[in-house]
Amino acid sequence: MPAILLYFWRLCLLRESPEKIPSSIIITFAATSFYFIIGMVSFSINRPELDLSTIIGVSLVSVSIEGVALFGLLSFKRYRNRYLSTLTAVFSCNAILLVVLLPVNLMLLELQEGLLLDIINTLSLVSLFWWLAIVGFILRTSAQISFVQGIVLAFVIELLVAISIRSLFDQFI
């Protein structure tokens, strides 16, 4: 297990290639489940006023849109056979980043306006750019597109997730 986590951490650092991930439904299911659970925990920390059904709904929408968008991209580029390994790479790296950001999110809840809050918010923004770079790197390899195209697609996918969540759960969020 530590070797697997180290591999995905190295993937987050752009030092490993996503091509090494086997195309396995079991591994993809495990990565998706881990990401789903960590996403729910993270969202519940960021929005403690929300009920469990809203948190589950938001997490389902997020995972579904990301999965469908990756499937569409890989199908369009005729690399559908790389879907499971790409999804595993993206969801595993997302989950690792969410775990790393959990303490930051907890600190955000307790901080008052000021310099420390500004620093923490800046770190959150840096983590967004880091995540975009990771997904761009994964998509560069998996879909044979440029790194910049991968970053732009990752941003568009996240924007689509945010818009969908806002429109579906606006009365709750």
Image (spheres, helix red, strand yellow):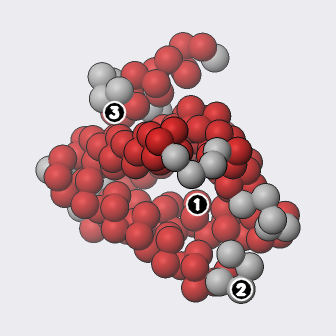
Vertical side of 132 occupied by 100: above or below? above
Task: Give the amino acid type for the residue marked by disc 2 in the picture.
Answer: Gln
Return the residue nearer the eye: 126 or 7.
Answer: 126
Quarter placement of the C terminus: bottom right
Q: Secondary structure at mark 1?
A: helix
In the picture, the quarter occupied by the N terminus is top right
Name the kind of residue labelled 3 in the image.
Answer: Glu
Q: Is residue 142 left or right of residue 85?
A: left
Q: Which residue is mark 1?
A: 63
Mark 1 in CB contact with mark 2 (< 8 angstroms): no
Q: Which of pointers 3 and 2 lies earlier in the amino acid sequence? A: 3
- Residue 117 visible in the displayed image: yes
Residue 123 in percent (x, y) is at: 43, 40
Secondary structure of the residue carrying tag 3 is helix
Question: Crowding near pointer 2: few (<14 within 10 Å), some, many (20+)?
Answer: few
Q: Residue at x 81, y 65 (%)?
A: 49
Instruction: Report which residue position mark 2 lands on.
Output: 171
Q: Nearer the viewer, mark 1 or mark 3?
A: 1
Label disc, if present, on residue 19 of the rendered structure: 3
Residue 84 shows in the view: no
